[in-house]
Image: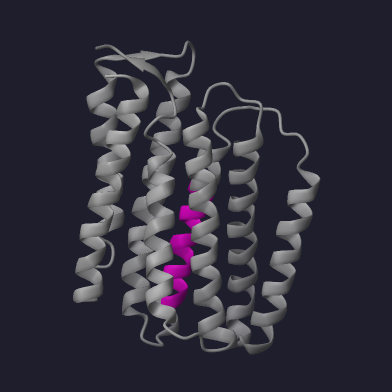
Amino acid sequence: MTASSLFVHSTSVYFITSFVLSLLYFVRPNYVTKPLPIIALSGLISWNRSRTTGGAKRVVGTSSTASLYDFYISIGLMLSSCGDVMLELDDNNKDYFIAGLAAFLLAHLSYICAFTSEAAQYTNMLAFIIIIGIYYAIMMSFLLPSVESDLVLPIIVYGLVISTMLLFGTARYISTSHTYTHESKLSSLVGSIIFLLSDTILALDKFAFRITSAKTIIMLTYYIGQTFIAISTCKNYLEEVKK
């Protein structure tokens, strides 16, 4: 089996698993069903790695880096599942909301560690820094006037961290690194963008103005974004798999 066919197979397993388990949440939404797709994705990373290490031919010098990348993505997913539980229990309880926000903040920091786990040269980043900076400024201008005073700092910090996560996801994609494959870099970038979109809709709906079908859109984009981020581990270090 070639690395490309293995990637397609693994990607299919990730998407099918995420889709089936996410349906459980849409059918019966609660704090048990909500994190199931995310926990499963974390488990699939370990499964995929264990089944490829035996027959895989690795690019020289990248094994430890790939392992580190997988580790940080898995940790980010598990932290996200904790955030899922907290936000599902929220129901206008500020303590649960802050706890969920903290869990997702740590998840984004873990993703940042993954995206920067290999030293690489980043060029032409100024335009992306400006674009993401403008996004952050616009979001804060919408949110902060409506946020309670004790939530201002958490919202500012969280917005900065998730924006930074997208910045490094972009940097990873355009980097000159030869360790990670194009599929891996593209998956992490797409996942970062969709995750940011999910959080943007959530924040605007909660603090700025109501959005039609917000809950459905938020959860769809959230699960899709996390699935793409998980998929970025599928072919991040393999050159080929022995037949």
Query: For the point 37% across and 34% down, which residue is it?
Result: 234
Query: Is residue 102 magenta-colored?
Result: yes
Q: Position of residue 122 (x, y in %)?
A: 72, 33
Lateral position of residue 174 relative to residue 96, left or right: right
Lateral position of residue 48 relative to residue 220, left or right: left
Query: For the point 24% across and 50% down, which residue is it?
Result: 16
Give above or below for 226 relative to 184. Answer: below
Which of the 4 image quarters holds residue 19? bottom left
Give above or below for 201 relative to 120. Answer: below
The image quadrant where one finds the N terminus is top left
Return the residue nearer the eye: 116 or 171: 171
Q: Position of residue 130 (x, y in %)?
A: 79, 55
Return the residue nearer the eye: 50 or 220: 220
Query: For the point 72% across and 73% down, which residue is it?
Result: 138
Query: For the point 56% across and 85% down, which residue is it?
Result: 207
Lateral position of residue 166 relative to residue 63, left or right: right
Q: Position of residue 117 (x, y in %)?
A: 54, 33
The image quadrant where one finds the C terminus is top left
Query: Is residue 106 magenta-colored?
Result: yes
Which of the 4 image quarters holds residue 8? top left
- For the question of whether residue 81 can be seen, the reply is yes
- For the question of whether residue 31 can be seen, the reply is no
Tell me the magenta residue range. 97-110
Return the residue nearer the eye: 86 or 123: 123
Return the residue nearer the eye: 56 or 74: 56
Q: Position of residue 195 (x, y in %)?
A: 49, 59
